[in-house]
Every structure is written in structure tokens, then in C-alpha cells.
Image (cartoon, grey):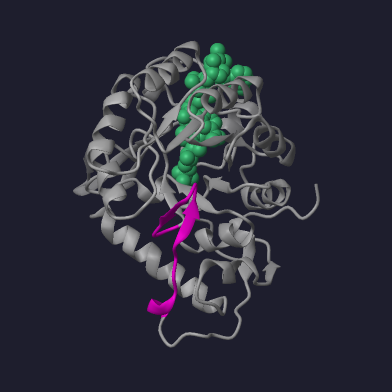
Amino acid sequence: MENIFDYEDIQLIPRKCVVNSRSECDTTTTLGGHSFKLPVVPANMQTIIDEKIAITLAENGYFYIMHRFEAEKRADFIRDMKSRDLIASISVGVKAEEYQFVEKLVAEQLVPEYITIDIAHGHSDAVIEMIQHIKNHLPETFVIAGNVGTPEAVKDLEEAGADATKVGIGPGKVCITKIKTGFGTGGWQLAAVKACAEAATKPIIADGGIRTNGDIAKSIRFGATMVMVGSLFAGHEESPGEMVEKDGVLYKEYFGSASEFQKGEKKNVEGKKMIVEYKGQLQDTLTEMEQDLQSSISYAGGTTLDAIREVDYVVVKNSIFNGDRN
Ligand SMILES: NC(=O)C1=CN([C@@H]2O[C@H](COP(=O)(O)OP(=O)(O)OC[C@H]3O[C@@H](n4cnc5c(N)ncnc54)[C@H](OP(=O)(O)O)[C@@H]3O)[C@@H](O)[C@H]2O)C=CC1
Ligand SMILES: Nc1nc2c(ncn2[C@@H]2O[C@H](COP(=O)(O)O)[C@@H](O)[C@H]2O)c(=O)[nH]1
């Protein structure tokens, strides 16, 4: 593969500004027929999202995807979101009981607007069969399938009926897939997003490796419709991770969905646990992301995210500090 680069290797090139204030720039994106304030979704991980955060995000016009690690709560979660007239967006795996869960939703007339199939190696018959199962039983539901790292995978999952694919194998902050298996898009995630987006006929969600708000704009430039973010959303007051105090400084836990901590056993572990410095309120981070993205749009010489998709760029190896190095 040629032209390999990652977020820190790219600088976007400014174009003449057409607004008098960054506040004129609109960061709205559309996915599955709904508009959202930001092209950003918190990772569907247990230390990043819970029911309370999901309600707050949905009430305030942000996209969210509930995690799948308290499987028995999901039907009630959908019911609760529907009773509030909010979007229901959940995750599933691919094991046998997940097929029955989808059938139970149909029997109880619970139709989530979004279902994300969340497994490590999404380019598989297991995911293809689950896409088909959901589409057969819940044809109205928008299906996001992943994770994948190649154009071939995007094509196969789209052909199976996926409405969007999620790209990123191993670039995550708490990921150890590349160390444990030798595989993944870690270190070239942005180039993988570009290759996958070029092959895609439906939306791409760039997942993992976002270390700065500028990386969101870069993901959009290379074809993402939405960006999934874990570590930048960890450590907030509302974050479900445990609070930890160390030498008088507050931190919160952030652990991988394939970590021993999440799994409760040392089997096929591909994630780790870390602590993230306490960051205060989630809304402040969302507001800063919106302002930074408005600024990105202004540098792109437009008023909407589409302007970013058209800018030129340069590849300058390690042109900005990679947040993983400290
Ligand atoms: N984005 C990323 O880079 C990664 C994300 N994760 C996250 O960790 C969580 C757990 O993932 P996962 O282990 O897939 O979920 P599960 O433990 O639910 O596994 C899903 C099913 O897929 C099988 N499976 C998993 N990996 C492979 C593989 N490489 N080859 C063949 N079959 C496989 C499992 O069987 P068996 O366990 O018996 O193999 C199981 O039947 C998810 O939330 C996932 O998103 C994990 C790793 C990488
Ligand atoms: N290889 C692993 N990847 C994981 C695990 N748990 C989650 N993830 C992926 O990371 C992103 C978040 O990345 P970040 O860089 O923004 O922190 C998340 O959406 C998953 O795709 C894991 O245990 N192993």
C-alpha cells in the first residue's frame, strides 16, 4: 500500500475565509436520516457511556451508541428512550444469544433507530450473518458494522446490507491488538480511513486514534462521516469509570472492551486499563470540540463540514506531537 500516514503526519492547507465569525460555521452532520450537532460519537465502551450520558447526548442533539456489556439492560434502555421520544442506539455482538435478542426486540415491537455490531474483527461471516439477521427482522434500523480496516471489508459488509461501516483495528488508546497479534491500522489509521472511504458507497465512521480535536477535521477530510472517540471522552465528571486519586491529583479509569478487566478473565485479551486525568464536565469538552471544528471549517474556506472535505493537505512526517508519546 502506498501513501501511508497517520493523524500526526498531516496538515490541512487553509483556504480564503468566507465568514466574519467562526460561530457562522455549522458542524452538523447527518447519519441514518437524523442530523447531529457534531460528527463525533463517544466510543461504545463501558467507561465512556452509560444510560445517563446517552439520555443527555440524545436530548441535546448529539449522536451516541450505547455499549453492549450489560446485555440484559438493553431492551429496557430502548423502551426508556422511546418513552422520552429520544433516538435509541444500541450495540450487539455476534454470539447465538444476540440473534435471540434481535428476535425479542421484534416480538416486543422495540425498534431501535441504530444498531452497531461491535466486534474486534468485523470482516467475518459472523458479522455478515448478523447484518442480514438484523436487516431481515428490523428493516427500518440503521446498521453500523465493524470494525474493519480494509476496502475489501467495507465492500463485503456494505454488500451484506450494512448502512455504515466502522474503521479502526488497533489504533485505540487502550488497545494492545497490534502488540498481541501484529495486525491492525495502528500508526496508519488515517490512511486506512482514506482507503476505506474511497471504496465505500455508504458512510464511514473513523474509530480510534483521535488524540486532538484537529484529528476530527482530518478524519472528515479523508472521508469519515462520523468519528468515534474514546480517550478524549474519558475522565469526565459524568464518565462511568471509577475516580482515582494519586498524589493529590484526580483521575478516572478508562479500560478496553477486550481488557482482562472488562472480560473478567485472561482470555483473548487485546485491551488494557489506564487512568486519565480528571477533565471536569463533558459538556465543556463537547463545546470545545464544536468551537475547534467551527474554526477548522473557517480555515477550510466554507461554512459547513463539506468545505473540509475539499481542502488540500501536505504529508509532513510527525509534523505535530503525537499525544501518545507522553
Ligand atoms: N477496534 C479494535 O481494534 C478492537 C476492539 N475490540 C473491542 O473489544 C470488544 C470485544 O471484542 P470481541 O473479542 O470481538 O468480542 P466478543 O468477545 O463478543 O467476540 C465476538 C465473537 O467473535 C469471535 N471472535 C473474536 N475475535 C475473533 C477473531 N479474531 N477471529 C475469529 N473469531 C473471533 C469470538 O470468539 P472467540 O472469543 O472464541 O474467538 C466471539 O464468538 C468489542 O467491544 C470490540 O469492539 C477488541 C479488539 C480490537
Ligand atoms: N484493540 C482494542 N481496541 C479497543 C478496545 N476497547 C476499545 N477499543 C477501540 O478503541 C476505540 C477508542 O479509541 P481511542 O483512541 O479514542 O481511545 C474504541 O471505539 C474501540 O474501537 C480493546 O480492548 N482493544
Q: Is residue 48 above or below residue 218?
A: above
User: Does residue 241 appear in the picture of this structure?
Assistant: no
At x 61% / y 81%, what residue is drawn?
Answer: 15
User: Does residue 126 appear in the picture of this structure?
Assistant: yes
Q: Is residue 314 above or below residue 162?
A: below
Q: Does the segment drawn in magenta span residue 33? A: yes
- Residue lying at the far right of the rendered structure: 2
Magenta-drawn segment: 22-38
Image location of residue 248, percent across then percent down:
19, 48
- Residue lying at the far bottom of the rendered structure: 20
At x 45% / y 17%, what residue is drawn?
Answer: 98
Q: Quadrant of residue 102?
A: top left
Image side of residue 142 versus residue 67, left or right: right
Number of residue marks: 0
Q: Is residue 232 above or below residue 143?
A: below
Q: Quadrant of residue 164?
A: top right
At x 56% / y 48%, what residue is drawn?
Answer: 206
Image side of residue 250 versus residue 16, left or right: left
Image location of residue 198, percent across then percent down:
72, 52
Q: Does the segment drawn in magenta span residue 147? A: no
Image location of residue 288, percent across then percent down:
35, 65
Q: Is residue 279 above or below residue 181?
A: below
Image side of residue 1 versus residue 198, left or right: right
Q: Nearer the viewer, residue 115 or 286?
A: 115
